């Protein structure tokens, strides 16, 4: 990302209106990092987050939240790369989008 350029993932996950917006959020490296850490049971890494820019902090926290939702649903999501969204994770996010449209 160029200095001064808007980050294409700068869309809050709760406010994403459609899949392309949500997909940009999920593809953010800090989202993926937070998701993987939470899924593996590691505690919140405050030192890591404190070193991130504000958007990175939000993405890390978003990733941990989605991982917790997946765990609550009994889903085990294998997600080795932020560039390939697993179908189970995509379904969770699409369900969230549909629920927000209905509200």
Image (cartoon, rainbow, N blue to C red):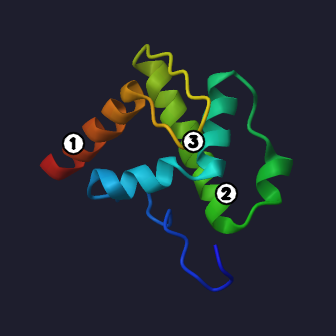
Task: List the residue tagged with mark 1.
Answer: 99
Q: Nearer the viewer, mark 1 or mark 3?
A: 3
**Residue 65 versus residue 19 in the image, above or below:** above
How far apart are the two marked residues, 1 and 3, measured between alpha carbons?
Answer: 24 Å
Task: First in sequence, mark 2 or 1: give its number.
Answer: 2
Q: Which image quadrant is residue 52 in?
A: bottom right
Q: Nearer the viewer, residue 30 or 65?
A: 30
Element at badge 1?
helix
Per the image, label 2 sits on a secondary structure element best described as helix
Quick check: can you spot residue 52? yes
Image quadrant assignment for residue 86: top left
Q: Tell me if residue 49 comes above or below residue 65 in the rendering.
A: below
Which of pointers 1 and 3 lies earlier in the amino acid sequence? Answer: 3
Looking at marks 2 and 3 on the same chain, the residue that comes earlier in the sequence is marked by 2
Q: Read off the residue under disc 3.
A: 82
* Secondary structure type for disc 3: loop
Q: Which mark is residue 57?
A: 2
Residue at 35% over, 39% down: 93
Depicted 90 relative to depicted 16: above or below: above
Residue at (13%, 47%) from the top-left corner?
Answer: 102
Give the x, y percent position of residue 65.
Answer: 53, 38
């Amino acid at each position: 990302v160029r200095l001064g350029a808007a980050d294409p993932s700068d869309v809050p996950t709760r406010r994403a209106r459609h899949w392309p917006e949500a997909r940009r959020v999920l593809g953010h490296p800090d989202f993926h990092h937070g998701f993987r850490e939470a899924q593996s049971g590691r505690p919140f890494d405050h030192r890591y987050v404190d070193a991130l820019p504000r958007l990175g902090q939000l993405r890390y926290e978003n990733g941990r939240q989605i991982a917790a939702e997946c765990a609550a649903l009994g889903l085990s999501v294998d997600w080795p790369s932020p560039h390939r969204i697993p179908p189970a994770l995509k379904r969770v996010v699409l369900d969230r989008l549909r629920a927000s449209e209905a509200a």
